Amino acid sequence: MKKFLAVTLFLSLVTGTFARPPKQEYYSIRIYQLKNSDQETRVEKFLQTAFVPAMHRLGFSGIGVFKPIGNDTAAIRKIYVFIPAKTMEQLATLPQSLEKDAQYQTDGKEYLDAVWDNPPYLRMESILLQAFPDMPRHAAPDSLHGPRDQRIYELRSYEGPTEKYFASKVRMFNQGGEIPLFRRLGFNAVFYASVLNGAHMPNLMYMTSFDDMASREAHWKAFSGDPVWKQLVAAPEYQHNVSHVDIVFLHPAAYSDL
């Protein structure tokens, strides 16, 4: 037994599998702003027939495409695209990689060659994030059973009043145990991440998912009443670490990987 343990330890040290934490993924979230149903249709066609297939050819997986609930009646419609990558370089070189993909250029021609006075969207926002250490990789929900068109993906954005307070909220998720609490209560998290570059900083974002809105309400009720959360939120070191919260309820597109 001692010999076996010694060999196992040696192999672990040599291969780097002993105590080496998983590398944290990087994420890009694109938010298309659309003025009407025509633009929405054009962007969706591009994403479904050109962008998502091209990303799969490039080795990306877990591409999420989502539309806010009530999108069809909103003054400015939106489409959210979640892009996970193993390295920052994959995201930095993505435009060049797509430019070299002849099939992508053909499939996306209508969108890519749109004329200046008839663009497919109003604006496109891009947010760069890095996964939290306690959930270094994104995850597709594994316990959703309801109809896909009723599923709720909840995207939350937490801003901190200063960098120091923001760091406190990040610790609350990781060292403080907020992520394990979400996991224990079955929130089906897709990701937790710090925003590295975006319009609202300092900032973190995370996404959870539910069978439907009733399930979402039940989960959050259980969360707010959990003794671990009550102890965590009362801890002196975690006071005043969130200055603004944005919550968006999303439905997945039929062609979304998530």
Image (spheres, rainbow, N blue to C red):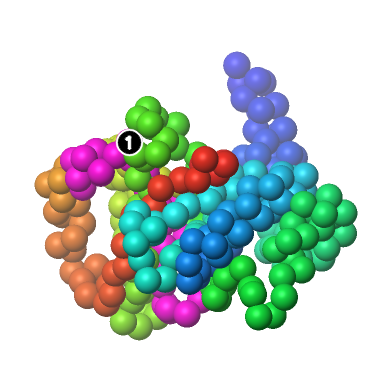
Which of the two residues, 229 or 124, is positioned nearer the viewer here?
A: 124
Which of the two residues, 49 or 136, is positioned nearer the viewer here?
A: 49
- Residue 223 % position (x, y): 20, 46
- Residue 138 % position (x, y): 52, 47
From the viewer's perspective, tell me whether residue 161 is left or right of residue 114. Answer: left
Q: Residue at x 66, y 55 (%)?
A: 46
Q: Residue at x 44, y 31 (%)?
A: 142
Q: Secondary structure at mark 1?
A: loop
Task: Name the residue at the top extreme.
Answer: 1
Q: Which residues are magenta?
A: 191-220
**Quadrant of the drawing holding the N terminus:** top right
- Residue 163 % position (x, y): 40, 80
Task: Name the residue at the bottom extreme.
Answer: 162
Compared with 194, 61 (above or below) is above
From the viewer's perspective, tell me whether residue 239 is left or right of residue 176. Answer: left
Residue pointed to by mark 1: 211
